[in-house]
Image (tube, rainbow, N blue to C red):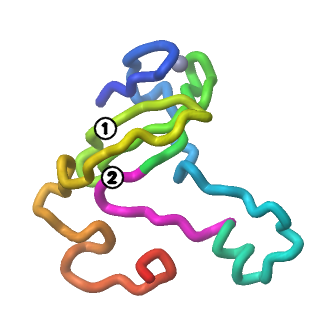
Amino acid sequence: MFLIPCPWCGPRDQREFKCGGEAHIVRPRLPADLSDDEWGDYVFMRKNPKGVHHERWVHAHGCRRWFHMARNTATDRILAVYRIGEGPPAIDAAQSPTPCGEPAVGSGQTPVEGPANR
Ligand SMILES: [Zn+2]
């Protein structure tokens, strides 16, 4: 168990929250103008890094408000919580390394190919 600091309610048990995926995904202005590949990238492709990641969360069993969280996915350390509409705070990724210094994507044993790594 760990505590998540809701920007409105304060620290609460993680079981009260739901993750809504990667934060700061910008919807295309004219979706009809996108190719199938571009639309597929917008809908399905996410970074999923090992390390610092900005995510959307909702306090589902509390105030039911959405907010953003910067979290180290390798350690579950919460680096910042900020409200929707606020820009992400500056976070020095070097201050929150993965436990063994692995690369941000993949296991560290084999290279990972994909659009997120280009
Ligand atoms: Zn709340």
Q: Which residue is depicted at the point 26% across and 40% down?
A: 77
Q: Which mark is residue 52?
A: 2
In the image, the segment drawn in magenta is: 43-53
x 38%, y 27%: residue: 4
Q: Is residue 88 above or below residue 8?
A: below
For the N terminus, the quadrant is top left
Is 47 left or right of 26, judged from the image as shown?
A: left
For numbered disc 2, what is the local secondary structure? strand
Quadrant assignment, res 98: bottom left
The front one of 87 and 114 is 87
Is 8 situated above or below 94?
A: above
User: Which of disc 2 and disc 1 is earlier in sequence?
Assistant: 2
Decide: marks 1, 2 in contact (CB < 8 A)? Answer: yes
Going by the numbered disc 1, the residue's amino acid type is Leu
**Where does the image place residue 113, in percent across and percent down from the top left?**
40, 86
Q: Position of residue 53 (x, y in %)?
A: 39, 52
Q: Image quadrant for the C terminus?
A: bottom left
Q: Residue at x 42, y 15 (%)?
A: 10
Give the residue drawn at x 26%, y 53%.
93
Query: Measured from the top left, where is residue 92 in percent x and y?
Result: 26, 49
Magenta: main secondary structure: loop
Residue 35 appears at what percent x and percent y?
Answer: 79, 82
Q: Secondary structure at mark 1?
A: strand
Residue 17 lies in the magenta stretch: no
Determine whether, in the image, residue 23 is placed left or right of residue 30.
left
Hey, what amino acid is under mark 2? Val
Q: Return the residue at label 1.
A: 79
